[in-house]
Image: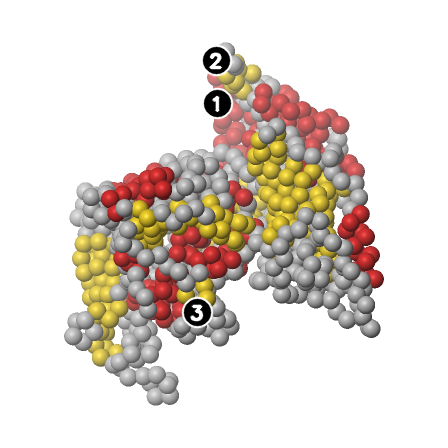
Amino acid sequence: MPGRTGVAAVSAWLYVPAGRRCVVGAVPPVELRVGNTGTDDVWFPGVLDGSETASRFPIYRPAVLGATDEVVAEPPAPEDGLVGPLRRTDFHRLRPGETFDPTSRGRFLPLSTFATFTPAVPGTYRYRLLIDTTAEDPGAWLGKFGQQAYTDEVLPLLAGVPRVRFVTALDVDVGPAAPGTGS
Amino acid sequence: MLGVSDPTIVTSGMFDRFEDAQDYQEEVAALGNGASTSAPAPAEAEAEVPPQPAPPRPERIQAPFPRPLRTRAVRGRYRGASGNWRLELRVDVDGERPTRRVSGDFFSTSGSTTGYFGSFVVHAPTITTKPAHVLIEGTGSFTWRAAAPKIRLRIPRVPAHQPQRPATLEFRTASDTAGSAYQCTYESRYFRTVSYEEDSVTGTVPFVSYDTASLPQPAGSPARVLTVPKALAEAGIELLTTGAANVIPTSAAGANATWSDSELHAAMVNHFSRFTNAPRWQVWMLVAGAHDGGYRGIMFDYEDAFQRQGAAVFYDAIKGTDAASRRSQLRTYVHELGHAFNLMHSWQKDLAVPPAPLGPNGGLADLSWMNYDWKYQQSPSGPGGASAYWASFPFQFTENELVHLRHGYYRNVIMGANAFSSGAADIDPDLFDDPVQDASGLALELRSPKPAFAFGEPVVVELKLSGTELRDRETHGYLHPNDDLVSVAVQQPSGRTRLFRPLLRHCVDTARTVTLGVGRPALYESAYLGFGRDGFLFETPGTYRIRASYVAGDGSRVLSPVLRLRVRPPATGADEIVGELLLGEEQGQLLALLGSDAATLRGGMTAIDTLVDEHPDHPLAVYGRLAKGINELRDFKELTADKTLRVRPAHGAEAAQLLARVVEDSVADTVGVDNITLNMALRAKARAEAKAGDLGRAVDTTRDMVRMFEGKHLNPLVLDDIRAQAEATWQEIGADDGENGHRSSEA
């Protein structure tokens, strides 16, 4: 388990991959990376069941704002609290300088708000993401079912997660639909 | 419960003749109009017919020329009994959304008590529809080791206006010997019936109904008015509203007026008129104001020993009288009740024990009551969100969810039995959740040491973990399923998929870091998968599909391709006898443990002795000798009933003799034990010879081991490992022997 004796720091950034365009009628290809900017190894969790609605830690709460800062997309009120267990595989080990995608398909959950928001009019949209790992109480992280089998293995990893709370944002210019797309 | 009695081989109390069914078949045949078909029975309209104790014979129809009869669907719930056994049978081969399965639950009566015994499902039966009856045949998956696992079910077809006549269910052994038989009377068109009590808190308004035509819906979804019971009825589940609808004062929610899960549970205990801490087909729904967590609803009973008895919806979060609000309310009610039936969220299916397959796009593309509308997404870059969900959602459960609701094993579905997420579904190795992107730099492979296994033969597979890049890749070396970081799923010939759960799990508490690369391209491990905590996995002849998942040091999950292997049926009488000697519960444990002196496993050890003594030349005797040989090599410690530690010393000479025969019988590649086990047996033989005082022979054995594997033309790096193992074994033997003052001067 990585210790926390060094400087543990993480940063996160949203971006649109080079060469990709954002147009009306299509989901903007906004992606996320989290990086270790400290001097020590850290364990960092990806987007889990309940993260997006802030029903459990880690919190990854997204929102999309329109031209006048009005919220045009955000997760609804949480449906229910039956979030799955926190497991060892929910953590990614980051060495200093390394980055990872906490929405990586097959391992973590996507941020559905970003993954399904389709702008209807051209303009600049602000993609905003709150990342919060500050809860010290394991109960705020653990799942509501099936957790017992994993608790012993995740508690040491939880101790190695840097406690951070910050917002990262990206302004995305959405252009008109390409001719012939019908959008 | 297991092994003492078996409702598939009842020998007393069963009826001898199915006269009614036979006569009736003849009568209908007289009306007949065509040849047999092998297609499933068409989904025909079902007439609601009040139950009648003695269904009348059909009257002969005077028709000028033969014309097709409009017949009832045969689907539904039937009930039978034989001796002390009661059977609830579910037939799901026609009617609305048939899953083409048959399942049942057995109960045994003793005195005036009746208890649940076990369940079975036939996942892929052959369905033959004839003019007079539907014939369903197949091999079932059982919750116990059924002696007669094959079924033959005949259900009369009757005109639509007549009540369904009894079905006859016969069980047969794998070798087609008749087992027990049940005559089952038709009970209901529903597969399961659940009592439903709905209470509300003062100030809330319970949902009543939603007309699916109120808002645009997918073209294939018929317009209809859905209530909560109607939505479940479409899945084949009957919700019988019971008890008075109580109105609960808001004070029950505590001072803050919002509800916690524990407050909801307390309210259920106090207000659910049928509440009892026991498995029962009954569920309580509370319409409350608001939850502490701001939820729309919750199945709050997920913590104690009798879970899934109650759910709640929160009026403040879902209220509204417009069509969209009522549509969402319906979804929330049905969704939370789905949890009470042990259905998990669409993206959580792989978290069930055992894991279930995720639907497309990690489950997010499921058009199901169990998905969230806002999380719905057809594909990673496809359309999604609430509007896309409602544009496509036909107000139904997925096919896999239907299978669970209708045919899930009794304890996995009934409220108050298995914990939420336990036994929630089965798994499919082909759908074992492939990562969309795999940058782990690792590859996992499963290999079978032989093209097919004999009936009863212990199934051992080889696991190989290798690097996929030229650069070195660091990971951990825990490659055995016993080590908790490797999972293995096995799909059986019946179609059922089970997770291999090893008898013993090893704690992974040391680093054991390995670097895979040019210097060491791969790791190998041999794993006996034949018997685990859930019993035998490969006891039926047929083709099995196996897939493994390895969690690497950085958390990456590496999946193997699917390995197909075959278990042959017994070719001779001796094969069958020998196979049965190896397939006992205790023998399975002994093979997993490689022998034991434990008194509780004495019966199994006797069977293995019988195998070795009475069938010494049978190819499977090698496994008996292996288990006995390794056991003889041990100083076996046993804590007796009076708490005395008794040590049975190792028998080196006997162990060496048994293991020598194991080696002799395994020299050829496709007979005897696999190479990795052979390697282990050779080193054990050397230790046994050393214990017997023959150090020279022991050293020869280690040298023979190297020569033998050199002759098998293995990878040079693997051969290097084997040479190192031989050297280590020699040193171990030398050290042991050195303590006795006669260290060998050889080698």
Task: Tell me, yes or no, if residue B241 can be seen here.
Answer: yes
| Comes first in the chain, label 3 or label 1 | 3
- Closest to the observer: B295 or A6? B295
Residue under mark 1: which chain is it in? B
Q: Which residue is mark 2?
A: B643
Label 2–label 1 contact, CB within 8 A:
no
Q: Chain of mark 3?
A: B
Of residue B505 and residue B261, the one placed in the foreground of this image is B261
Residue extending furthest bottom? A179
Where is residue B106? Give x, y as percent.
61, 40
Mark 3 sits on what residue? B212
Q: Amino acid at mark 1?
A: Ala
Can residue B458 be seen by looking at this rendering?
Answer: no
Disc 3 crowd rating (10 Å Cα; few below 14, some 14-19, many 20+) is some
Count of picture labels:
3
- For the residues carrying marks 2 and 3, which lies nearer the camera in this image? 3
Task: Give the numbered dot on residue A114.
Answer: none
Are the two marked residues, 3 and 1, in contact with CB atoms closer than 8 angstroms? Answer: no
Query: For the residue carrying disc 2, how many other residues have a C-alpha within 10 Å: few (<14), some (14-19), or many (20+)?
Result: few
Q: Position of residue B433 (x, y in %)?
A: 46, 57
Look at the numbered disc 1 and give the secondary structure of its residue: helix
SS at circle 2: loop
| Left/right of residue A172 with respect to residue B41 in the rendered view | left
The CA distance from mark 2 to mark 3 is 70 Å
User: What residue did someone put label 1 on?
Assistant: B735
Select label 2 or label 1 by which is in front: 2
